[in-house]
């Protein structure tokens, strides 16, 4: 039964306080700024090069920043995207940025037809959170995210009907998900977990104002359905 279930998710790991926790922010920020993550060619395994590769990198970074800001605005505090080099305000403001460590686009065809890990995507990031109340941005929290579309069973799962019974027909839905899923969905999942980390941070300090708390998925846990 477990083998027939789709497992496409992003998890949080290696969460670290860059400064002693008691010295970090203790109230909800007035605003959260999201700066597009950095990415190098060495971190990418995609079927693009030259101009198409540069366009892919720009789109990747802009999409994650936009999705993160949208979710933070809904679940944590007012948020917006700021460009690299843009002057940052000073005050009760946080900055979210980071780096892509690995982006593997996988194969949509293999995910949807074969499944069981074939053609899976992979996205790893380092996320860094700064507070801007001092003369220079001060990092107070960082963590890593990892995951992707790794174990969707695909059309081949339908062939397991003699063993799995009706559960095997879930493969048809997951075959569609295999076509739809990929790097675009992985950035969305990464944005979800980043938002959940900040929600939990403020909730622990009883500083989450007017928002329902959400919890991040730690590596090794079963994925939860986080609110949109």
Image (spheres, grey):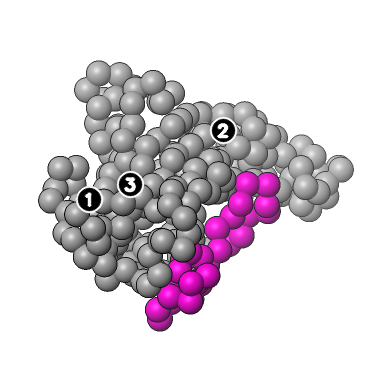
Compared with 37, 106 (above or below) is above
Residue 69, horizontal then vertical, whole percent: 32, 58
Marks 2 and 1, Cα distance to the nearest angstrom? 40 Å
- Mark nearest the camera among 1 and 3 is 1
**Magenta stretch: residue 167 in it?**
no
Could you say which disc has been placed on residue 75 in the image? none
Q: Nearer the viewer, residue 131 or 1?
A: 131
Which of the two labelled residues, at mark 3 and mark 2, occupies the earlier sequence position? Answer: 3
Count residues near mark 3 (Cα–Cα under 10 Å), then give few for <14, some for 14-19, many for 20+.
some
Q: Secondary structure beneath disc 3? A: strand
Residue drawn 44% across the image and 32% down it? 101
Which contiguous range is marked in magenta? 199-225
Q: Is residue 191 visible?
A: no
Q: Which residue is mark 2?
A: 120
Viewer-nearest of discs 2 and 1: 1
Q: Which mark is residue 136?
A: 1
Horizontal side, residue 186 vs residue 90: left or right: right
Q: Residue 222's x, y, as percent? A: 68, 53
């Amino acid at each position: 039964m477990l083998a027939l279930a789709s497992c496409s998710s992003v998890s949080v790991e290696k969460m670290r306080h860059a400064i002693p926790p008691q010295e970090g922010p203790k109230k909800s920020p007035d605003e959260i700024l999201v700066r597009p993550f950095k990415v190098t060619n060495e971190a990418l395994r995609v079927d693009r090069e030259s101009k198409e590769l540069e366009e892919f990198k720009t789109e990747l970074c802009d999409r994650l920043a936009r999705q993160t800001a949208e979710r933070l605005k809904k679940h944590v505090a007012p948020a917006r995207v700021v460009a690299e080099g843009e002057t940052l305000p000073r005050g009760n403001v946080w900055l979210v940025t980071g780096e892509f460590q690995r982006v593997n686009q996988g194969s949509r065809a293999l995910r949807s037809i074969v499944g069981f890990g074939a053609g899976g995507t992979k996205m790893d990031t380092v996320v860094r959170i700064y507070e801007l109340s001092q003369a220079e941005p001060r990092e107070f929290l960082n963590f890593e995210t990892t995951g992707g579309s790794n174990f969707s069973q695909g059309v081949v799962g339908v062939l397991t009907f003699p063993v799995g019974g009706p559960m095997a027909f879930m493969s048809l839905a997951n075959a569609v998900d295999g076509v739809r899923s990929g790097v675009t969905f992985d950035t969305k999942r990464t944005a979800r977990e980043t938002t959940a980390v900040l929600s939990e941070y403020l909730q622990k300090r009883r500083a989450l104002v007017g928002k329902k708390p959400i919890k991040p998925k730690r590596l090794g846990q079963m994925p939860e359905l986080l609110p949109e």
